[in-house]
Amino acid sequence: MSDEVPVIKAPRNKRFIKKPDVKARNAKLAELNKELDKYNKEIADLNKQIEVTVTPKDVLEERKRLTSELNTIIKQQSEIKNKRNLLNEQIRAIDGQMKKKIGDLQAQNSKNSFKNVEEIDKKINQLEDLIGSGTLKLVDERRYVKEITSLRKLKKDFGSIEQLQKSIDNDKLKIQELKKKQSAVSNKEIQAKFEEVTKSLDSLSLKNKGVQDKRQSLFDKRKALYSKKDGIYAEINKVRSEFDAQHKKFVADMEAERKRREEEERIYNLTLKKQDLQAEIELLKETSKRPAFTREITLVETLLGHFDPTYVRTDKEPLEESKAPSNTTSTGRKIEMPADAVIIKKEQENFFAGNKSKKGKKTQKKQSSKFVIEPDVIAQLSELSIALPSKADEIPNTISSLKAKLEEFKSKQEEQTKENIAKADEKAAKLEAEIAKIDAEIEEEAKTKVVKASEEAE
């Protein structure tokens, strides 16, 4: 451990951080709110004008009647349109079926050249007459017989062709009927009525145009005022947001300043503690080198000199309690004062006070009957656990006890001194370990501070 005393850097003074100006913010808000009140009054006036600028009642009634009639016409037009659409769908459906039947009929007719059953019968009769004449060869006769069989089969199939033709004719009749119905569902009258009502409504609108224009002008003015109000609200929000941001920064700066001061004070206190521990170690080393029981020996010899003026002290220095701390602990035993003992002030030098005057002789004779001990002597004897003499005859015993105590201290002095040095070294090691921990804490605080400064810079 270095003997050099480190220079302790005291914490810096608290940095002044300006608080956001609440009065300035409130003044701006008051000015903006004043403008808002102005616009609100103007809007209220416009609302009143809009309320009185209205279309006449008779015009409104006429418009209501015409509008209702127009809605009815539109409904009728919708119904007519739906009917016509339904007829068109039916015509398209029948026409589709008819075209399919015609296709089937044409396909069947393409297989033969006969148009009807009569033509087939006529052909069969011709072939039978030829066979009946007997003039035909056997091969031709067989061929004609076979052809007659085919024609008779065709005659049977031709019945279905006739039915198909009849169905086609019926479909044509249905289409004609549906088209007649479609022509009957006319939209011309309804359309004419629609145009008439629309024209009447347009005429009313033209008559009421002045009122509507004035109302629209009032609406435009009110809209402009609402836009200005929105601008004022935006300004108010901006003022509040800026103040909130400033206040937030103020709080953050105050918190950062508090943490900075706490860190500096913590390092300062740790450094002070380290210095105190170093001073304690130096004091331990210094006091442990002194012989044990120095104070006790000095105290005993002082008392011996007090009770026995012929006693020669072994030490030449007066008792200094502040420089020679006790190596033993007092038993704390209280010594009872004899009933006839008298405590005198310290400045009294003799056990028995004398006086040459007659009056003094009487006083000396009166005082000689009592044994007097100074208060300091009583306290010192009590500290050494030596019995307090109750009379002058017991002083030799007190001197013997003091000498025995002196020999006891001197005999134990060397061993106790070594023990004191060992204890001091042990305690000093513990204190040095505490200093090492403090150094580690200080170093860790310094590293943390560097890291924070780097993060703030980024």
Image: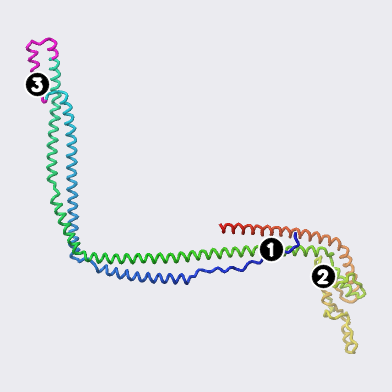
Answer whether labels 1 and 2 touch (C-beta < 8 Å). no
Q: Residue at 37% across / 71% down in the picture?
A: 37
Residue 385 in the image: x percent, y percent?
Answer: 83, 69
Q: Which residue is mark 3?
A: 121
Q: Quick one: quadrant of the C terminus?
A: bottom right
- Toward which corner of the image does residue 47 lie, by quadrant? bottom left
Identify the residue at image location x=64%, y=65%. 265
Q: x%, y% of residue 305?
A: 89, 74
- Which residue in the protein does label 1 denote? 271
Q: Of the numbered discs in the image, which one, if any, rests on residue 383?
A: 2
Q: Which amino acid type corresponds to the residue marked 3 in the rendered image? A: Asp
Mark 3 crowd level (few <14, some 14–19, many ≥20, 10 Å Cα): some
- Whether the magenta-drawn stretch holds residue 152 is answered as no
Q: Residue at x 19, y 49 (%)?
A: 78
- Tag 1: amino acid: Thr
Q: Is residue 299 left or right of residue 436?
A: right
Q: Earlier in the sequence, mark 1 or mark 3?
A: 3
**Precedes in sequence: disc 3 or disc 2:** 3
Element assignment for label 3: helix
In magenta, the rendered stretch is: 115-143
Q: CA distance from mark 3 to mark 2?
A: 170 Å
